[in-house]
Amino acid sequence: MQKSTITTLLVFLVLTLCSIWTTPLSGQTPIDSTQHYYRVIGYPQNTEDVTAGINYFKRQLENHKNDKARNNYYSELISLGYFNNGDIFESEKATINLLKDIPVTDTQTIVRLRNRLGRLHRSLNNLPLALENYQQALAMATKKEDSITISNNIATIYMERSSYEKAAQVLSPFMKDTDRIEDNNILTTIYDNYGYSITQIGDFKGEALMLEALAINEKSRNITGSFSTNRHLAYYYHQQGKEALARKHARLAKDIAYKLNNPRYKLEALGLAIDIGTTANADVFKKLSDSLYKVQTLQENKYAAQKYEYATFQTQAKESELIAQQEKVNKTRYQFLALFIMVITVGIIIFLSLRNKRKRLEQVYMTETKISKRLHDEVANDVYKLISQVQTNTYNESHLLDNLEHIYSRTRDISRENSFIETEESFHITLRDLLSSYKTPSLNIITKGIDKVDWNQIPKVHKTTIYRILQELITNTNKHSKASIAFVEISKEGKKLHILYKDNGIGGAINSKNGLLNAESRIEALKGTITFESKSNQGFKAQINI
């Protein structure tokens, strides 16, 4: 008979340690009892102790109704206790009920319970269903110890079918790495089953493996493991004609079966004794077999009543697994979608950043080109003409000074139009200085409301745009309109800024050469509006709303 207890032991140790930290020394009796009954169920010596352990953990269930983790742990031990006592129906019932409560994400618990179901169905001689549960458990197992235990249980199915070569193939990979198996129960089970399997296909090295397994089991008091190994050795020695050794191990197996007081073990021990000819007491065997048959028939009838419920559970479990898989697929899809969106977003940001950088470079280039052109057209030509006049002595001093003053004014205008604009502090003064700089004896500039606006609430880009537009408008007036008066009024209404600009010049058609369309594009960039009115001999007017 095989066992899978390593994972349950780890869970128990964690729970025990947690309890020790929160319980005073005088109150450790419940913990000691839990440890005691865990060992009783995990390493059974007799049915009475196992029954006491089952009853203890049932009481613990009642005492911890609201602690689901503990409830699941206790229920798992109760299921194992029923199994070790040979109560297949109750063990199966407890296992199935527990599987219903375990979330599909708790794969470790599901692995243990699926393995338990495999052992239960094997006890009912339903080998195909046992194999199916073992294979499902193996597919979900992530721990090496669990994989070894489940593989060993699969091997026992093949052994019962006398497919010893298949059994050996299942266990062979683990024989290469036995030094790294720390659990003696798992190690001896592999030695026992692998050793017996290879002896059945002609490799007698298996005898040494079975003897080593027996020695380890006896030293660690693994009584059920010792039963299995003694049984295998008895059959092996009987096949080899070593009857004294066969009788010895058959007797040891029988002693263990009666010590456990488990009818299944007793039946196997008596069957072994009859098979190797150490007893002719067929009546005892028949009586025990009939008794066990009645119990098994009753259990199988109960099992039949459970069959529909189990089939329903299997369907629900598969549906839950499909849902979990679909959720995993959906999660992966969403992750890829999020990644795709992120990549696209980053791509767009990079594209816009590069485009804006290119536009800024183009703007810088256009500004530099514009400055270069103006310097060439408005300054360089005048300087060249003045140099020519000086070289040919065709000038008078007064005319020379006027020309120098004109060149200086042109240079100052170009510098002012492209200079840094102070927008942080006292912007109203910056605007006044701009407008005042254009005053001449023939052009008076009147302002209104500039000081009343709270310029600290106006964004920097808005202030820069206002400065440049007013600069372009006043330059246009100065160059083209022949006006004597220019009027600038600025007011704020809510979040809107209103600018009115008027002059009393000659007016006329508006075209791209006078720079006004450039002002229009600046305002549109801020989602504002600008309108122009210009009629011949009726002046010029611009209304700006930002």
Image (cartoon, rainbow, N blue to C red):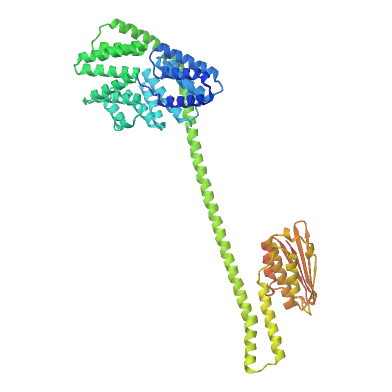
Q: Which quadrant of the figure has residue 184? A: top left
Q: x, y (%) of residue 362? A: 58, 68
Determine whether 263 is above or below 434 in the image: above
292 relative to 164 in the view: left or right: right
Which residue lies at the image location 53% right of the left edge and 52% below the top edge?
344
Which residue is more in the foreground, 315 or 130? 130
Residue extending farthest left: 241
341 relative to 154 in the view: left or right: right
- Quarter of the image containing the C terminus? bottom right
Examine the rendering and report whether any part of residue 301 can be seen: no
Determine whether 329 is above or below 375 in the image: above
Q: x, y (%) of residue 353? A: 56, 59
Q: x, y (%) of residue 229? A: 29, 19
Q: x, y (%) of residue 12? A: 46, 24
Which residue is more in the foreground, 26 or 527? 26
- Quarter of the image containing the N terminus? top left
18 relative to 465 in the view: left or right: left
Which residue lies at the image location 54% right of the left edge and 58% below the top edge?
351
537 relative to 31 in the view: left or right: right
Determine whether 267 is above or below 320 in the image: above
Q: Which quadrant of the figure has residue 181? A: top left
